[in-house]
Amino acid sequence: MIEYNGENYESLIEKGLIAIQYYATWCGPCKMLGPILESISEERKDLTFYRIDIDKYRAQATEVGIRSVPTIVLYRDGKEVDRVSGYQPKEKVLQWLDQNK
């Protein structure tokens, strides 16, 4: 899992399957989801995971329409495929990823 540090967003999502978790340090469900996504990112080499702190990068979160955290947005070759909000157990996240391959 890669922490977003202000890089060009379009270049992050332009190639391949990319999952971006929007989170906040004060968010309890985000803290619970973090280790799950970290584990999946180590298991699944077919996609790249990024994390974006909405308090540090509020403009970026607003631009893509993030209304609550945690939210995971899935992109394929620069286009949004799907998004899911709220805490999800690992099995649900894996199912969601498989449905949107």
Image: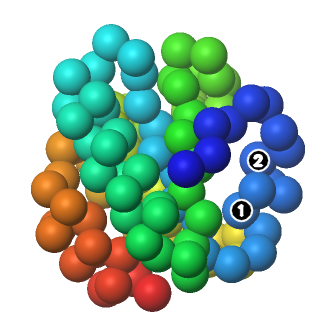
Q: Residue at x 41, y 22 (%)?
A: 24
On residue 52, the disc is none
Give coordinates of residue 40: x percent, y percent. Answer: 38, 64
- Give the residue pinned by disc 2: 9
Asked whether, in this view, residue 44 is left or right of residue 89, the answer is right
Q: Residue at x 47, y 56 (%)?
A: 73
Asked whether, in this view, residue 39 is left or right of residue 20, the answer is left
Give coordinates of residue 1: x percent, y percent. Answer: 55, 50
Q: Residue at x 29, y 51 (%)?
A: 36
Q: Residue at x 19, y 44 (%)?
A: 87
Give coordinates of residue 4: x percent, y percent. Answer: 68, 37
Crowding at dot 1, Cα within 10 Å, few <14 / some 14-19 / many 20+, comes out as many
Residue 64 makes an appearance in the image = no
Q: Amino acid at mark 2?
A: Tyr
What is the quadrant of the C terminus in the image? Answer: bottom left
Alpha carbon separation for disc pair 1 and 2? 7 Å
Front-lying residue, 2 or 42: 42
- Give the residue pinned by disc 1: 13
Q: Secondary structure at mark 2?
A: helix
